[in-house]
Amino acid sequence: MTKPDQSGPAPVSPTGAAGGDRSQQGESLTTAQGTRLSETDLSLKAGPRGPILLQDHHFREKITHFDHERIPERVVHARGAAAHGVFRANGAAANLTLASFLQEGVETPVFVRFSTVLGSRGSADTVRDTRGFATKFYTGDGTFDLVGNNIPVFFIQDAIKFPDIIHAGKPHPDREIPQAQSAHDTFWDFVTLHTEATAHTLWNMSDRGIPRSYRMMEGFGIHTFRLVNADGRTSLVKFHWKPRLGVHSMVWEEAQIAAGVDPDFHRRDLADAIESGAHPEWTLGVQVFPDTPEQEFEGIDLLDPTKIVPEELAPVQPIGVMTLNANPTNYFAETEQVAFHPGHLVPGIDVTDDPLLQGRLFSYLDTQISRLGGPNFGQLPINRPHAPVNDMLRDGMHQTAVPTGVAPYKPNSLDGGCPFTAAAGDGFIDVPVPLPATTKQRTRPSSFEDHFSQARLFYVSLSAVEQEHVALAYTFELGKCYEQAIKERALTVLARIDRTLCERVATGLGLAVPEVEDEPDGSIEPSAPLSQVGQEWPVDGRIVAVVADDDTDPTALESVTSLLESRSVLPLVTAPHGGTLFDGEDAVPVSRTFDTARSVEFDALVVLAPPTDERARRLLDEAWRHHKAIGAATDVAEQLPQEWRDSTGVETGDPQAVAERLVGLLGKHRVWER
Ligand code: HDE
């Protein structure tokens, strides 16, 4: 038997999945003590009709363990999905930081957990919300956690307000509704009174709040971090993850349908893509700023987490690529028990005084103690560093290490002085930052007072269709509020972002457009990277329904599916019935039937059978409404409405050529001009 050992690499299976030390070995069913069992279906009773005997250890052990299977869900970000992968540095950060995992060619195992914020652990994936994007880098110099979101600004500037925004966003305390939604009075009450939330709220109301896939989201560290290089030179940076597949979203109706018909939509999408070999990829980049005493750049306070620095002012410099290549083996052991912490830093990366980040440095350690049942959660396989650990932390609940030695204190002579501290310059560097002579006070800097210009920056950077979505989202969310005063207050906030946006929402709500004194600054220039429309992106891992029936020409079906597969797009044959289409050698398995498939599963449709069936027509109608590309064989096209046939994004003709053109359209995600 091997002794549990805190030092040395965590047990990682060839798939990259962390496995327990000694769990689930041998062929027979056993008790927790390893005694083989030949019966587990019947409890030990006094005769065939009972009662059950207290003596039945297997029964008591099985039920007792079951009774304690749940742990508290995360207080925020409870709903999530995760994957293993690898990060490969390109070396571009080597002049900025001595962090070993950012040196050229170094490969570091990672575990990434994506999440929604507000919903409970069993809530739907596709709700309108911010998404968490938390990455654990198991570096040779200790674990570095980049605990970010898919939105680059935050609701609040000071950590002391976190319970307030979360209490406002969570379900109402009396009936505990609505679940995983911001469309309710308490949320809008808070964000319209506490106007530093304006920019983040606008991002949530944009398409960023309803991502198509975790694979198609940007990630942001939000706060400014401080890097230190081998010469002791420091720089301030903001971290960005850029997805290779581009940033794409659902449309609101689609997200709502998906929440009902497939609440696991994003979880399934991530796992299926990885399993099929379409490994998601992100480039990690940094915006770099000089580390000046003011800690601002072009007038933007770098310590204010409600502000971004437009990429036109500070380009994102790529420093490496992350590929997610393995699904977790066990959801609970890995995805549920993983514990991130913005204070998990490595030599070369340090925090700044951003008051939100400073508060987070307290919260993440604290929360794990009640969530994971004590201070030893770092020993769970998924949380174990891959760097050697030789701490002097001892005992406590769920201690699984068996430390040697008698002197877990320093200085000591009984253990020969071990463990030794690292040589100067070899350990973690607390970057010495001079602090101005100041006064202890509960205040904020005046540079934190502008709550609207960055909301406007984001809004004016969106394309017309994205702006339309924002207006509809505000109208929907505020329309769900009961309190008139809250809706009216929300309009005064919108009037300070953009007059047209305010007018559109006011019209939808049936309310008057308010007059405000501080009209928006019309001179703000748009920033192109804030829009997610207008470019072309790789399509691998996209899903296309190929609608066929028993009368479809097998050769046409084959030509379409093989063309799509050759472009790394997944074709799903969708038919009126299950089983197979055609007989004998031509037989083609049916992946989805009209009874099981909803359009939300697909990025586009190729229709090789006339939509005579009501269910097929619903599939098509929804795809049309959601701006998805539709292809139809010539004979089928005749049965589509004339308006469709004349429209952009409806391709008709030879099936294989249609499929080819569809792949081109998929690269733009949606046919917005329709
Ligand atoms: Fe978190 N946050 N947070 N947060 N956060 C947690 O830690 C907190 C904030 C983020 O997949 C909790 O382990 C405070 C910003 C992600 O496991 C908790 C403040 C950003 C995740 C916590 C913030 C985040 C969390 C709950 C205000 C983006 C999920 C469970 C100062 C940069 C990580 C847990 C995972 C989770 C506290 C603000 C991202 C309670 C006090 C800003 C992605 O500790």
Image (cartoon, helix red, strand yellow):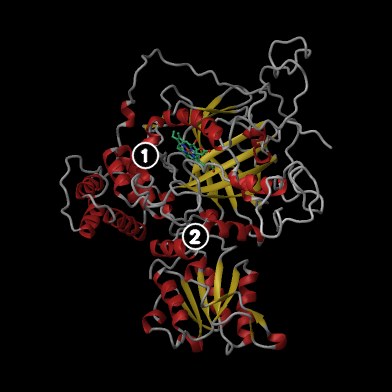
* Callout 1: SS: helix
Location of the C terminus (image quadrant): bottom left
Mark 2 near ligand 1 (CB under 8 Å)?
no
Q: Residue at x 43, y 58 (%)?
A: 533
Which residue is depicted at the point 80% across and 53% down? 28
Q: Is there any visible trace of residue 510 in the rendered image?
A: yes
In the drawing, does residue 17 fall left or right of residue 155? right
User: Is the CB atom of the residue marked by disc 1 within 8 angstroms of ligand 1's nearest atom?
Assistant: no
- Name the spot of residue 213 as percent of width and height, x first: 52, 57
Q: Earlier in the sequence, mark 2 or mark 1?
A: 1
Q: Evaluate whether residue 318 shows in this view.
A: no
Residue 530 rendering spot, x and y as whole percentages: 42, 49
- Callout 2–callout 1 Cβ contact below 8 Å: no
Q: Amino acid at mark 1?
A: Ile
**Residue under label 2:** 263
Tell which of 46 and 246 is nearer to you: 46
Q: In front: 35, or 240? A: 35
Local secondary structure at mark 2: loop
Q: Viewer-proximal residue, 395 or 577?
A: 395
In this picture, residue 521 sits left or right of residue 221:
left
Question: Marks 2 and 1, Cα distance to the nearest angstrom?
Answer: 25 Å
Q: Residue at x 42, y 69 (%)?
A: 627
Quarter of the rendering containing residue 401: top right
Mark 2 is surrounded, within 10 Å at the Cα level, by few (under 14), some (14 to 19) or many (20 or more) other residues, namely some
Which residue corresponds to the image point at 69% horizontal and 40% vertical from the top-left? 381
Q: 10 Å neighbourhood of mark 1: few (<14), some, or many (≥20)?
A: some
Residue 462 relative to residue 228: left or right: left
Dividing the picture into quarters, in which one does residue 190 lie? top left
Q: Which residue is mark 1?
A: 165
Q: Is residue 169 above or below residue 450?
A: below
Residue 126: image location, x then y, percent: 46, 57
